[in-house]
Amino acid sequence: MLSEPSSHLLIIGGGPAGSAAATTAAAQGIGVTVVEKDIVGGGAHLWDCIPSKTMSASALRMDSIRHASRLGLITEPSDVDMPRLSTRMAAITADINRGLVDLLDSQKVDLLSGTGRLTGTNSAVVELDDGGERQLRFDHCLLSTGSVPRVPDWAQVDGERVLTTRHAYDLPEVPDHVVVIGSGVTGVEFVHIFAALGSRVTLVVSRQQVLPYRDPEVAAVLEEDFLERGIRLVIGARATGIDKGEHGVTVTCDDGRVVEGSHALLAIGSVPLTADLGLGDAGVEHDGGYIVVDDFQRTSVPHIYAAGDCTGQMPLSSVAAMQGRKIARHIAGMPVTPLDYSKVSQGVFTQPEIASVGLEEVEAAEHGRKVRTTKVPFAANARSVLQSSTRGFVKVISDPATGVVLGGTIVGHRASELIGIVALAVAANVNIRQLVETLMVHPSASEAITEAAE
């Protein structure tokens, strides 16, 4: 059994938080060891986020082909080559992983392929993929082990008929009829993907609207689009069982409704990967598997930090990466301010896309806060009309007393890109009059933002 000298910063988990912390710490002259058992870049990022957005991009192109006649174009019927799409997704993932490994190597970061576990407040052991073992000591540690899709007891996942989202990227052909269970962000994204690729889709919605924690106006636009696509919505039903037959699946709901399809896709959240992390041996507190942290991402052991999905905070790659950078700066003794989660941009890659930042109208109403809300539909935007992408709107929320921009929601083509303008306004406490007087390109979808602020 080999031992090695003390490592200033040990990072267990090389996802967005871990890799960002590693590069930032290394740039400050801190010695770094990263332990990753699967893929640098992170499973949640490179097995969930990137592949799903790659599929979404292909689905968007398929939509464009199907509706090309609206733009005066005649196209031949198109089909989907799932093996080729899977190969493309794998190649993109491999490229990102390779780029991150090269970056860490260039910064002299020690990258270990294996599984890390804490053995004390300043020690850990790594079970290496090659069968060896290494004992490590550290001055600081970052736990960023991520999460995996949640699978309930009543679902027997086989990767063929009953799928988690991670099984959706390597299917031999486009499924005939997918029953999507879960109407949060991940669920509605896969509804859009499979419907656009040619599957029949049924969505089981446990509450009274899709995206249950979002603005009802946003949910209404998405539901309207789904219904126009022929998607069946089973509203107010919670799935309780999946029976697999020779040629398909049967999903049973708590209200007695039954849904049949060729495949069932579970999209009902995730669980943290912390069970075998040795939290108890190091005295690190957790709540239901999620590591408890303070505003600076410190655990109950102050020199041990945690970030990303394993903390139960906003499960976004962008958030995890920012947490990682802030942790590295904190360790280096640099001035650090806690991450303001109220100003985080979020996107939903459906068609139309959905993006938001800052305060939402429904949130303001729940807290009895007075806000000024202005909205412009994309049907009134010249660029959207000429592109035949008029579904959706821009909504801007500001403080009626000060005029400061507090938030915004965009539903429409490339909303995930447009939200950056509103996000910058929220982050910089811009006055809505300044937003109104910003000259955008004409014609452009961004004009809808200044028009909404008017």
Image (spheres, rainbow, N blue to C red):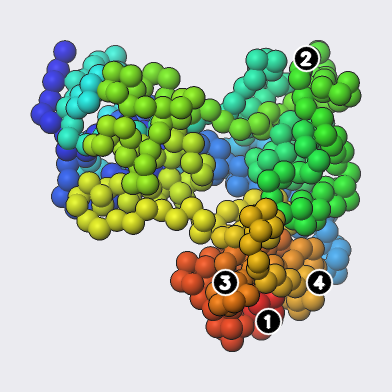
Asked whether the beta carbons under mark 1 and mark 3 sit within 8 Å of each other, the answer is: no
Q: Is residue 127 visible?
A: yes
Q: Which quadrant holds the N terminus?
A: top left
| SS category of the residue bearing label 2 | strand
For the point 26% across and 52% down, which residue is it? Answer: 329
Q: Amino acid at mark 4?
A: Ala
Relative to 306, does residue 213 appear above or below in the rendering?
A: below
User: Is 153 on the left-hand or right-hand side of 388?
Assistant: left
Measuring from the top left, give residue 318's x and y in whole percent.
47, 50
The residue indicated by pointer 2 is 244
Q: Amino acid at mark 2?
A: Lys
The residue indicated by pointer 1 is 454
The residue indicated by pointer 4 is 379
Asked whether the beta carbons under mark 3 and mark 2 sit within 8 Å of each other, the answer is: no
Of residues 186 and 301, the one drawn nearer to the viewer in this rendering: 301
Q: Amino acid at mark 1?
A: Glu
Graded by Cα atoms within 10 Å as few (under 14), some (14 to 19) or many (20 or more), the crowding at tag 4 reads some
The dot on residue 26 is: none
Alpha carbon of mark 3 to alpha carbon of mark 2: how far? Answer: 51 Å
For the point 52% across and 68% down, which residue is it? Answer: 426
Question: Mark 3 vs mark 4: which is more N-terminal?
Answer: 4
User: Is 211 on the left-hand or right-hand side of 90?
Assistant: right
Q: Amino acid at mark 3?
A: Val
Relative to 47, does residue 369 appear above or below in the rendering?
A: below
Of residues 426 and 353, the one drawn nearer to the viewer in this rendering: 426
Graded by Cα atoms within 10 Å as few (under 14), some (14 to 19) or many (20 or more), the crowding at tag 3 reads many
Asked whether the beta carbons under mark 1 and mark 4 sit within 8 Å of each other, the answer is: no
